[in-house]
Image (spheres, rainbow, N blue to C red):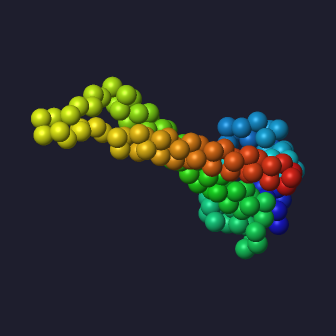
Amino acid sequence: MNFGEQIKSIRKNANLTQEQFAMKLNVSRQAVSNWENNKNLPDIGMLILMSDVFQISLDQLIKGDNQMNNMTEKVIKDGSETRRAKYNMISSVVGGVLLLIGIMLLFIKGMSVEYIDAQGILHENFFLIPSGFFLIFCGFISFVTVGVRTVINKLKNRKAE
C-alpha cells in the first residue's frame, strides 16, 4: 500500500471527510487531497502530528505494511540530504577558516621585520610564506570540493526527476 492509500485508509477508518481530517491537522483540504493522490508528501513534523492525533505508530505510518513505500523513500532521502547539508556546511566553515589563517600568515609575514642580530644570525619568519600559501590552497580545495559535489548532486536529482 502506498502512502496516499494509507492516509485515505486512516481517514476512512476515522469516518472523516478530507475537510474534517484537514481540520484535525490544521492543514488545507487540498493538502490532504494531494497526500492521498501522491502528488506530494507531508514533512516529518506532520507525520508526528498524524501519529499523535490518530493514535498510530510512526513506524506503521511511515513503513506501512512492511514494504518500502514512497513515504519511506522520502524520509530516507530527507535524512541523506540533511547529512549532506551538514557535511557541506562543515566543509565550508573549515575551508573559510583555512583561508583566513593563510591570509593572516601572509599578512604577518608582510608586516614583520627581518634583522641580523649581533652574532650575525638572520631572524626571519620565512616559514610563514609556504605555510600561508598551503593553507590558502587547502581552503580553496575545500570550497571547490563542496561546489563540485553540490553540482553533481543537483545533476543527479535532475536526471532522477
The quadrant of the picture occupied by the N terminus is bottom right
Of residues 142 and 73, the one drawn nearer to the viewer in this rendering: 142
- Give the side of residue 140 with respect to residue 29, left or right: left
- In the image, 141 versus 92, the foreground residue is 141
Q: Can see residue 77?
A: yes
For residue 41, say whether it is visible: no
115 displayed left or right of 16: left
Q: Quadrant of residue 19?
A: top right
Answer left or right for 45 relative to 8: left
Q: What is the x, y in percent for residue 111?
A: 33, 25
Taking the view exactly as shown, the residue that stands out farthest to the left is 118
Relative to 41, residue 23 above or below: above
Residue 79 higher or lower than 34, as above or below: below
Write the residue at 23% across / 31% down. Answer: 115
Counting every numbered tag in the picture gives: 0
Residue at 34% in and 31% down: 108
Nearer to the camera, 157 or 56: 157
In percent of width and height, residue 141 lies at 58, 47
Q: Residue furthest top?
A: 111
Report x, y in % for residue 142: 56, 47
What residue is shown at x 51% (from left), y 47% (from top)? 138
**Place of residue 151 in the rendered image (x, y in percent of width and height, measured from the top left):** 74, 46
Residue placed furthest toward the bottom:
66
- Write the residue at 72% across / 62% down: 72
Question: Viewer-proximal residue, 85 or 101?
Answer: 101
